[in-house]
Amino acid sequence: MKKSAIRIVLVFLILLGASCRSVKKSSKSFDTKRNEAYIDSIMNNALEKGFFPGAQIVVGSKDSIFILKNYGYQDYSKQQQVKTADVYDLASMSKVLGATLVAMRLVGDDKINLEDKLGDAVAVYKNTAIADLTLFELLTHTTGLKSGITFYQSLLSTSDGLPFLSNQQSENYPNLFDNMYVNKNIVYDAKYLSFEPKDNYIQIYRNMWLNPEFYKTVYEKIALANTNPRGNYLYSDLNLILAQQMMEAKTGLKLDQLTRAIYNELGITKIGYNPLKWTTVQDVIPTEIDNFFRKDTIKGYVHDEAAALLGGVSGNAGLFANATSISVICQMLLNNGKYQGKQILKAKVVKAFTKSPLAKKGIYRGLGFDKRKPDGFYKKNDFGHTGFTGTFFFLNPDNNRFLIILSNRVNPSRTNRLMYKDDFCPKIWKLINN
């Protein structure tokens, strides 16, 4: 065969290979137009049915944003449309976007170990029944601690001696809270609560301050909360509160300081605790009308009562953010801890935290991160978290895609669970994850 003929054949084979690669790549590409139309349809349907008053959505990959959209209004008064700068109460998404990120940083820097024991780090638990709990157990929710404690209710009583709540509406129980009615004669404990600022008191709401002496009873109750078998999976807010205490004790810094250092490195500003310290009240999405504890529409302060008592900075809840800021964290995680040339988290740590170390025991949880047994919606390596207020984010490191949905489905009331009954978020995740 002549040299010229050989060259032609070689060029043809190279072009054929490139074509095959191109076809293979395009088969996995994201059809933005089609997916955006589907998301618009499902979102408009959700708004019509009253799943929530409004929402933010971001769909992206490790290096691109495919869809970034806002839908609806901040609340049902429809006075303010949702905009990109608005921040939502993330609820339990705080567990991973706050405390877990800090744990990943500290583990990578050898400032804390997953086998470190609670009692060795936090003196108040040293001689208690939970002293031997490890950071690994806290992050995988295998401590045996009960799911939560309604600390705030010990700050309340009723002047008529009747229960706080009733399943029947009446003159004494006029206002709805979740699926119960609240006694109108609630009395606040003046020993611990003040409705004006006091020296050393912690602000827990717009017009409420807490005597820090109350924390002694909080820690005592947590120390007695190991009521389930250790080693089994049971999701608990208490686990991340304790993880927070361990990390703060190890570093001498507060959780909001530790997270802010990471956010600053990522260049994101629309994320943090106590949002009225760093954004305007107009840019904060309201959550529930709380007829029980705070007697107000909650806006600019954390919805979760336990996190509120901790001054809005807690391992279990308290973060506010917009979807754009969270998308940066997602891209960093999908890039093995790197963002814009900076290694924010160690790659091996990202891999370890987002796997299921206890899968052989039938526990699919990651370290901090939520993972699911593979089914029609979720794949083996998917990881992320959800939040009680109506928030969701998940990532797939195999196809490098992520989805963020932020809503305030608890406005005006947490009784609204329509988005869960409809598998709303999982349906969208399944669509963009294929």
Image: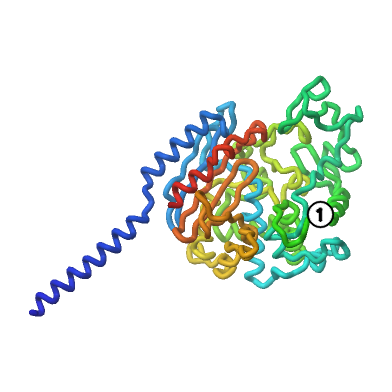
Query: Can residue 329 be seen here?
Result: no
Picture quadrant of residue 348? bottom right
Crowd class of label 1 (few under 14; some 14 to 19; many from 20; radius 10 Å) = few
| Residue under the point 68% across and 60% down | 139
Left or right relative to 397: residue 258: right
| Residue under the point 87% across and 54% down | 220
Colouring mode (rainbow / by chain / secondary structure / one colour): rainbow
| Residue under the point 56% across and 53% down | 268
User: Where 208 sits versus 434, above or below?
Assistant: above
Picture quadrant of residue 52? top right
Left or right relative to 33: residue 310: right
| Residue under the point 58% across and 37% down | 421
Outermost residue to the left: 2
Q: Where is residue 284 in the image (x, y as percent from the top left)?
A: 61, 39
Q: Position of residue 177 (x, y in %)?
A: 73, 31
Which image quarter is the N terminus in?
Answer: bottom left
Towards the viewer: 373 or 73: 373
Q: Where is residue 325 in the image (x, y as percent from the top left)?
A: 54, 51
Q: Mark 1 points at which residue?
A: 227
Towards the viewer: 256 or 141: 141
Label 1: state its secondary structure. Answer: loop
Outermost residue to the top: 171
Q: Where is residue 233 in the image (x, y as percent from the top left)?
A: 70, 57
Towards the viewer: 135 or 124: 135
Outermost residue to the front: 361
Query: Can residue 422 be seen here?
Result: yes
User: Where 205 sits versus 139, above or below?
Assistant: above
User: Where 394 sits versus 283, above or below?
Assistant: below
Left or right relative to 341: residue 13: left
Looking at the image, how many numbered discs can be counted on the residues?
1
Picture quadrant of residue 124? bottom right
Q: Identity of the amino acid at label 1?
A: Thr
